[in-house]
C-alpha cells in the first residue's frame, strides 16, 4: 500500500488502476478514513485530468459513487433496522445493475453479495 502511494505515474491508465487497487484495499481492510480520503482525492484527480476520456471518467466516477454507497451500507448494517437495510441494499443493487458504465462492477457486486451473506 505504501509503495502504491509513493509511485509517480506517467500513464493515466496505470494511475487509475493503482487508485482503484488502493480503494479496494482500504475497503477490504475497513480503513474508513483512508477510504473516504482517497475517494475525494480520486474524484478530484479524475475531474482535473484532461487525458482521461469522457467514457473512462464516467466509469470511474460511477465506481467511486457505488463504492462509497456500498461502504456506507456495510458500516450501517448493524445499526439500522432490517427493513431500512433491505431497502437501501435493494436500491444500490438495482441501480448498479441498471448502470452500464461502471468500472470494476463485478467487484462491487461481490461486495454487495458478501454484505448480504453477512
Image: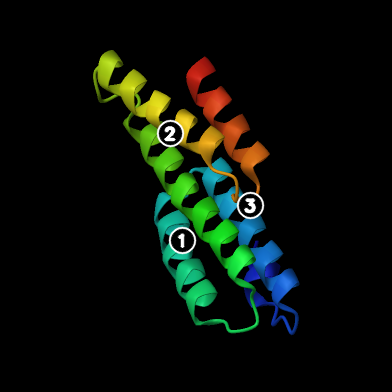
Disc number placed over residue 92 in the picture, else none? 2
Disc number placed over residue 39 in the picture, else none? 1
First in residue order: circle 3 vs circle 1: 1
Q: Residues within 10 Å of mark 3 (few under 14, many from 20)?
A: some
Q: Quadrant of residue 82?
A: top left
Figure coloring: rainbow
Nearest to viewer (mark 3 / mark 1): 3
Q: CA distance from mark 3 to mark 2?
A: 15 Å
Disc number placed over residue 103 in the picture, else none? 3
From where the camera sits, is residue 46 visible? yes
- Work out whether 93 lies above or below 100: above
For the point 48% across and 29% down, the residue is 93
Which sits in the foreground, 80 or 48? 48
Q: Residues within 10 Å of mark 2 (few under 14, many from 20)?
A: some
Q: Quadrant of residue 12?
A: bottom right
For the point 64% across and 73% down, the residue is 53
For the point 53% across and 45% down, the residue is 27
Q: Is residue 83 left or right of residue 28?
A: left
Which sits in the foreground, 26 or 108? 108
Q: Position of residue 102 (x, y in %)?
A: 59, 49
Q: CA distance from mark 2 to mark 1?
A: 18 Å
For the point 68% across and 68% down, the residue is 4
Quadrant occupied by the N terminus: bottom right
Q: Is residue 78 left or right of residue 32?
A: left
Amino acid at each position: 500500500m505504501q509503495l502504491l502511494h509513493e509511485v509517480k505515474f506517467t500513464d493515466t491508465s496505470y494511475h487509475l488502476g493503482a487508485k482503484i487497487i488502493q480503494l479496494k484495499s482500504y475497503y477490504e481492510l475497513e480503513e474508513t478514513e483512508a477510504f473516504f480520503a482517497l475517494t475525494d482525492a480520486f474524484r478530484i484527480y479524475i475531474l482535473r485530468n484532461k487525458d482521461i476520456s469522457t467514457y473512462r471518467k464516467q466509469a470511474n466516477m460511477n465506481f467511486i459513487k457505488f463504492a462509497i454507497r456500498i461502504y456506507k451500507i456495510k458500516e450501517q448494517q448493524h445499526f439500522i433496522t432490517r427493513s431500512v437495510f433491505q431497502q437501501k441494499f435493494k436500491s444500490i443493487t438495482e441501480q448498479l445493475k441498471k448502470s452500464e458504465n461502471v468500472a470494476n462492477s463485478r467487484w462491487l457486486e461481490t461486495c454487495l453479495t458478501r454484505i448480504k451473506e453477512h
